[in-house]
Image: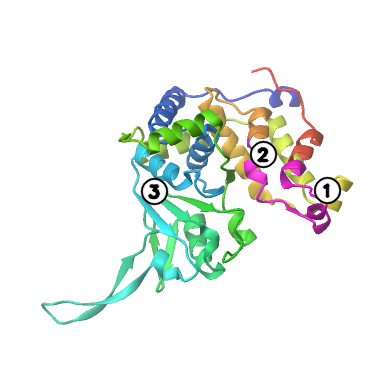
Amino acid sequence: MSAATKKTTTKKASADDEKMAKALVEAYEKLKDQVHKVIVGQDDVLEQLLIAMLARGHCLLEGVPGLAKTLMVRSLAQAINLSFRRIQFTPDLMPADITGTDIIQEDKTTGHRELVFEKGPIFSQIVLADEINRTPPKTQAALLEAMQEHDVSVGGKTYHLEEPFFVLATQNPIEQEGTYQLPEAQRDRFIFQVLVDYPSRDEERQIVEQTTSTFESALKPVLDGKTIMQCQETVRRVPVPEHVYDFVLDLVRMARPNEESAPKWVKDLVDWGPGPRACQQLILGSKVRALLRGRYHVTTDDIEALAHPVLRHRIVPTFNAEAEGITVESLIDRLLKEAPKKEEAVM
């Protein structure tokens, strides 16, 4: 087999994987129907949240107050039938308030005292970190081990979190007083930074009508944790053509100002670029997106569709770029235009 042939060959899905992929598409449609009983619009946000979950990632949602970010996460947890806890981040929140702590308990029969670990709210399958940028970095760091390793270490002991485990965090982009910027290491732990925008006029009318009347809707679970974990395994087996890998590597490496291959404008406008995790998340997220669209292979269209949520929190513009009003979104658009893109192979 020639090298050119290898680049256009994709692995055929097994019968089990095809069955799981088809079931996932059906479950996704049912999931949207359930969530839309409460949430009006926001299809892109909902899709990105589900992609993050199936890619074993975490999401950072950013939007002004009143756009139902918290309600969407809560509704999603109900529709997937996972345990859910909400943590309201405040300046006085301590790490132990998140992870839990050892407390002294006395056995009433023997009078013997011992340390017993009292689990914190992080011990849930979906954790909503509400207004995560309102707490100091020391407390924010309490999430790092849980997000990366799915473990919590307290008092020299390590406790494993129940799978599947996701952190969905929200932050307000306009209010700066009393907030703490997330460290780059923590921002990089999120597969996506999802922008929650204002609804359209028709959507806003429907929101107003529902929330100012006696309208009520109970959500029914359409997915469970076991199915989510099976889907996560199926996602890992989705093949990726060589030209898609090349496109991802070129796109991400072009965004690093210290790379020799980076365009001159990147060196002038970008202070810090994305690391290897950006490539990993682009590939994983695109695998999920392909499955949700009934395909068992990834295309460059999948990469382009997820480039903004994957890269927007991993690119730091220079002071000059910000002074000139150049946004991260425009930088990503320019990268997508200039990254070398080969023709899609015939599947």
Q: Which numbered disc flags the more N-terminal residue, 1 or 2?
A: 1
- What residue lies at 41% left-to-right and 46% top-to-bottom? 164
The amino acid sitting under disc 3 is Glu
Q: Which numbered disc flags the more N-terminal residue, 3 or 1?
A: 3
Label 3 sits on a secondary structure element that is loop
Q: Which residue is mark 1?
A: 266
* Image location (x, y in percent) of residue 306: 63, 37
Q: Most extreme residue toward the left, as rendered?
A: 109
- Start-end of magenta stretch: 306-331
- Residue 108 figure quarter: bottom left
Q: CA distance from mark 3 to mark 2?
A: 27 Å
- What residue lies at 75% left-to-right and 47% top-to-bottom? 327
Label 2 sits on a secondary structure element that is helix
- What residue lies at 46% left-to-right and 23% top-to-bottom? 18
Q: Which residue is mark 2?
A: 307
Q: Which residue is mark 3?
A: 163
The amino acid sitting under disc 2 is Ala
- What residue lies at 47% left-to-right and 62% top-to-bottom? 89
Q: Most extreme residue toward the top, as rendered?
A: 346
Identify whether 50 is placed above or below 141: above
CB contact under 8 Å: marks 3 and 2? no
Label 1 sits on a secondary structure element that is helix
Q: Quadrant of the N terminus?
A: top right
Instruction: Identify which residue, 313 or 18, lies in the foreground.
Output: 313
Identify whether 264 is placed above or below 108: above
Instruction: Identify which residue, 237 or 105, lies in the foreground.
Output: 105
